[in-house]
Image (spheres, rainbow, N blue to C red):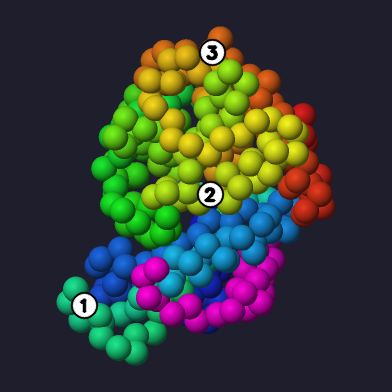
Amino acid sequence: MPPEVVFLNGGFVPYDQAVVPVEDRGFLFADAIYEVIRCYGGRFFRLDDHLERLEQSAAALEIPLPYDRARWTQVLEELIRRNGVRDGSVYVQVSRGVAPRAHAWPDGLQPTVVAIARPGGTPPAEAVRRGVKAITVPDNRWGLCWVKTTGLLPNVLAKQRAARAGAYEALFVRDGLLTEGTSSNVFVVREGVLYTHPLANILPGVTRMVVLEVAREAGIPVREQAIPVQWLERASEVILSGTNSEVLAVVEVDGRPVGDGRPGPVFARLREGYLARVAAETGAAVDVGA
Ligand code: PLP
């Protein structure tokens, strides 16, 4: 079912009437940024962190954001209300605007703003309970992976490879180091220490930040340092974090089991801590034991 209304350039428009000109630079060049924000029980989780990242992406690409945080909040709250979405997510995209096709952009463009709300999106209960499979792929992305742009072809192709291999996620490997997933950050547990790539040419995941908060609070030793891909062979756990994935255990990489091939204790503590934070911050009745 498509959403009833989407937000487009300042107004709420029926889904099938929401159209963007063919020379929108988001369409022509992927000259656009985006965010995906979760809501639980009708309340956004970590909205401010997502809006801060949107501002950073916009600044990096010199796209002037048309709204301040208060206005974004108002717009997105109204969007989920109008669509009756309580547990789901919103997709927000801001492109540089519409202009005759040329690489350099003219002055004075009006950014195109689109926001779409959809219910659902939580990982299947089976994926939470049994863990998921992943493959590794070369990280052939550019040098600004911290900017959340819609230019996602390397991620799209890698995720498709994962899907064809019957896996949930593809993990990027750059210079022999594990960077992140196509739409998730990745953690490796080795000798009781939780490792994750530092914030250097990866996406600074909002969920990654929550997982690190939870880990530190739980007294799990954390190191933000590059992870050699060979560590996967001796890792006791591999864990994904992301707005859509929440917190998931990876139990197989490239056909080899991780640890004993089942979700481990660090995963269980991190997922529980993540959901406890969701419940505390949104007031939603989240099933922590799921
Ligand atoms: N890494 C990449 C490449 C992503 O695209 C995403 C989210 O889409 C993430 C990590 C996870 O970020 P977040 O937790 O903010 O959703």
Which x, y percent locates residue 232? 44, 20
Relative vertical location of residue 53 with respect to residue 188 in this rendering, above or below: below
Give the labeled residue for mark 1: 104
Report the span colored magenta: 60-86
Q: Does the residue labelled 1 lie within 8 Å of ligand 1?
A: no
Q: Nearer the viewer, residue 52 or 201?
A: 201
Relative vertical location of residue 17 with respect to residue 270 in this rendering, above or below: below
The answer to which of marks 2 and 1 sits earlier in the sequence is 1
Q: Can residue 3 be seen in this view?
A: no
Asked if the residue under mark 3 is in contact with the one under mark 2, i.e. CB atoms within 8 Å, the reply is no
Q: Does the residue labelled 2 lie within 8 Å of ligand 1?
A: yes
The answer to whether residue 203 is magenta is no
Asked if the residue under mark 1 is in contact with the one under mark 2, i.e. CB atoms within 8 Å, the reply is no
- Give residue 156's mark: none
- State the residue at coordinates (35%, 56%): 144
**Spatial CA span between label 2 and label 3:** 25 Å
The local secondary structure at tag 1 comes to loop
Q: Residues within 10 Å of mark 3 (few under 14, many from 20)?
A: many
Answer with left or right where residue 276 lies relative to residue 1.
Answer: right
Q: Which amino acid does label 2 sit on?
A: Gly
